[in-house]
Image (cartoon, rainbow, N blue to C red):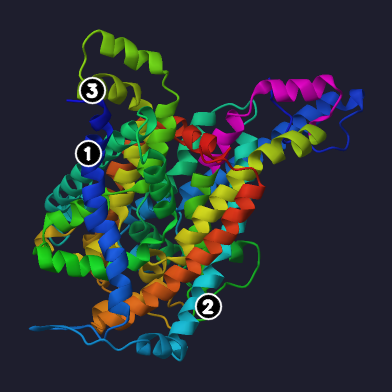
């Protein structure tokens, strides 16, 4: 086991009779660090949740209360039509946009990554070099020209503007390629021997084998698309197309208005919840996906 | 279908979209930055003005201030990496409930910044916020977190909180990919825990740390949402991207906005190149 090597200090390590004390103190230190980290990670979520159970007067009251006097769940029902546009519509918009974005991204990137990882062809290294170097380029520079592009395409105020332009991501290609390289070539040769077509290999062998990487990368990209604010802010004006983030921004302007603060909190809970559930379900895959990342860093 | 053509065909979708949505805007941005392009319906276009936008930018006090704020903001990142590293090291030992801790740390990463900023606005509240309540509990004077002078630092604290979990996961993955034999070999040759950590774990983690630093620098210099949602339009927190956003989409000065974007782009590029040189020295291998 590579167990206790890192949390211990160099001093008081060599004395054998100190062992039990050492073990207890190291464990206490470890668990207290981890617990402090966990509490601070949770605190804002806890605060949001109890705010939605408080009355607006209690939220705005002078005294800080750590648990509502009269927990009131009504906010979660009234929040449904408090948001503008209504919450179901907003959630549907976001699921539609982020879902199709992620799907498109994974399909396109994995196909590209497969070609780069498993075929030897002229220009391959050059193409890979181009992808690597664009990975580094800060995206801010394309913001204004992209908006003009959307204008010319007539995509302003449409779902297309939210889905298509972002779906090119050199980073995803890079990570997937690194993952695919680890698949032994014999698998593909065997498939070819049995008469599998080139696309069939991609569809039936590469994609299933890459499931862990696809899951992790898909999750991250879904989340980042779901949470994006700047791009939707620029290209969407029509309230019916508002994503969760735009709708939340709209709520912000209500912040000063006393009577609705618990509803605002409840809406925020609703908008945050899908991602939290999603990430808890997929948290197993996450670490696997990031292991790929650290391989590339080595 | 000839097999030698297959990879090219597989690459078509990517390169088509790459050309339209990335390469073209990239080149076009440079072009617009040399024009007086403005969006005034029905008129849409601009004249070639040469370097005028750039000259204007370097005399623009507010732009320089915005750049300065972005650079101050980036400083949250070493702290964030440090905390992430400590937590990852603690998590990488024999402890109970590792996956629970991991999931909890990751919650802020997957939560939207808009929602986070919203809650933190309440947490930072001078009168009712829990932060000041805790300070009062210890008999300390309350802090005006979102005042003009403190707001940028408050945003940095929020970002540290938000991104710490990402670093934990990345470092944890890196730690777990260090082969056990290394530690055993060290132990057999009589190294104590501290020496093992100092001479085996740290050097092997260095590339990952640098990698995190590089990606985070580029990301943080382009910060927008955090600042825009938590502090809105306070002049002492206006960051570079926020200023570009305002010039381009509030004042509709696309030409000037593009010039500012090009400047920011070049700054980030230079910094990234310096950092990549460090990465190389740190032993990063691409492929």
Q: Is residue B222 visible?
A: yes
The secondary structure making up most of the magenta span is helix
Horizontal and vertical percent position of residue A214: 33, 32
Same chain assignment for discs 3 and 2: no
Image coordinates of residue B119 in percent, x first then y, are 39, 60
Q: Quadrant of residue A252?
A: bottom left
Q: Nearer the viewer, mark 3 or mark 2?
A: 3
Q: Which mark is residue A103?
A: 1
Using a 10 Å C-alpha cutoff, classify the residue at mark 3 as few (fewer than 14 neighbours), some (14 to 19) or many (20 or more). some
Q: Is residue B151 visible?
A: no
Chain of the residue under label 1: A
- The vertical placement of B104 against B161, above or below, is above
Q: Report, in whole angstroms, how far the alpha carbon at label 1 lies from the one at label 3.
A: 21 Å
Is A150 magenta? The answer is no
Q: Which residues are magenta?
A: B168-193
Q: Nearer the viewer, mark 1 or mark 3?
A: 3
Residue shown at 44% from the left, 87% from the top: B62
Parent chain of label 3: A
Q: Is residue B190 magenta?
A: yes
User: Residue A293 at x, y = what percent?
Assistant: 49, 38
Mark 2 — residue? Answer: B68
CA gap between label 2 and label 1 equals 39 Å
* Numbered label attached to residue A198: 3
Image coords of residue A182 (percent x, y): 45, 24
Q: Which residue is rendered at x = 33% and y = 26% of the image? A: A211
SS category of the residue bearing label 3: helix
Quadrant in the rendering for residue B240? bottom left
Please name the residue shown 65% across and 69% down the image.
B140
Q: Are marks 1 and 3 in contact (CB under 8 Å)?
A: no
């Amino acid at each position: 086991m590579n167990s206790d090597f890192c949390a211990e200090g160099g001093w008081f390590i060599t004395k054998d009779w100190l062992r039990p004390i050492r073990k207890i103190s190291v464990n206490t230190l470890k668990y207290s660090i981890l617990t402090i980290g966990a509490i601070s990670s949770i605190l804002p979520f806890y605060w949001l949740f109890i705010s939605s159970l408080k009355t607006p007067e209690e939220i705005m009251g002078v005294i800080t209360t750590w648990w509502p006097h009269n927990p009131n769940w009504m906010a979660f029902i009234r929040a449904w039509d408090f948001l503008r546009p209504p919450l179901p519509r907003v959630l549907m918009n976001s699921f539609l946009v982020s879902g199709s974005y992620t799907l498109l991204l994974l399909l396109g990137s994995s196909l590209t990554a497969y070609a780069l990882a498993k075929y030897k062809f002229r220009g391959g290294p050059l193409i890979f070099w181009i992808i690597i170097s664009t990975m580094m380029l800060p995206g801010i520079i394309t913001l204004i020209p992209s908006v003009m592009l959307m204008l010319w395409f007539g995509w302003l105020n449409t779902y297309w503007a939210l889905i298509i332009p972002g779906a090119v991501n050199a980073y995803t290609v890079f990570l997937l390629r690194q993952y695919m390289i680890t698949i032994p070539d014999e698998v593909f040769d065997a498939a070819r021997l049995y008469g599998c077509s080139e696309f069939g290999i991609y569809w039936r062998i590469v994609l299933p084998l890459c499931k862990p990487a696809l899951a992790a990368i898909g999750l991250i990209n879904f989340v980042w698309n779901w949470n994006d604010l700047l791009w939707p802010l620029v290209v969407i004006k029509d309230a019916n197309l508002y994503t969760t983030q735009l709708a939340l921004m709209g709520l912000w302007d209500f912040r000063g208005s006393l009577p609705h603060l618990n509803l605002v909190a409840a809406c925020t809970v609703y908008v945050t919840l899908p991602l939290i559930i999603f990430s808890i379900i997929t948290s197993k895959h996450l670490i696997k996906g990031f292991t790929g990342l650290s391989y590339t860093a080595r | 279908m000839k097999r030698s053509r297959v990879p090219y065909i597989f690459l078509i979708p990517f390169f088509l979209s790459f050309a339209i949505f990335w390469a073209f805007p990239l080149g076009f941005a440079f072009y617009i930055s040399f024009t007086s392009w403005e969006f005034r319906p029905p008129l849409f276009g601009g004249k070639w003005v040469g370097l005028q936008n750039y000259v204007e930018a370097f005399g623009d006090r507010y732009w320089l201030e915005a750049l300065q704020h972005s650079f101050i903001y980036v400083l949250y990142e070493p702290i964030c990496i440090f905390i992430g590293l400590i937590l990852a090291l603690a998590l990488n030992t024999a402890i109970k409930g590792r996956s629970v801790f991991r999931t909890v740390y990751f919650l802020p990463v997957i939560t939207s910044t808009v929602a986070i900023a919203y809650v933190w606005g309440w947490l930072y509240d001078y009168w009712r916020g829990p932060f000041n309540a805790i300070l009062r509990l210890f008999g300390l004077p309350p802090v005006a977190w979102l005042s003009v002078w403190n707001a940028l630092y408050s945003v940095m604290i929020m970002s540290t909180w938000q991104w710490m979990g990402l670093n934990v996961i990345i470092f944890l993955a890196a730690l777990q990919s260090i082969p056990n034999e290394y530690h055993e070999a060290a132990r057999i040759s009589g190294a104590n825990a501290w020496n093992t950590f100092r001479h085996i774990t740290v050097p092997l983690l260095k590339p990952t740390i640098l990698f995190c630093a590089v990606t985070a620098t580029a990301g943080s210099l382009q910060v927008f949402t955090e600042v825009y949602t938590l502090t809105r339009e306070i002049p002492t927190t206006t960051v570079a991207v926020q200023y570009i956003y305002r010039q381009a989409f509030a004042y509709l000065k696309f030409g000037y906005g593009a010039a500012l974007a090009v400047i920011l782009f070049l700054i980030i590029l230079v910094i990234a190149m310096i950092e990549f040189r460090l990465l190389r020295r740190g032993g990063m291998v691409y492929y």
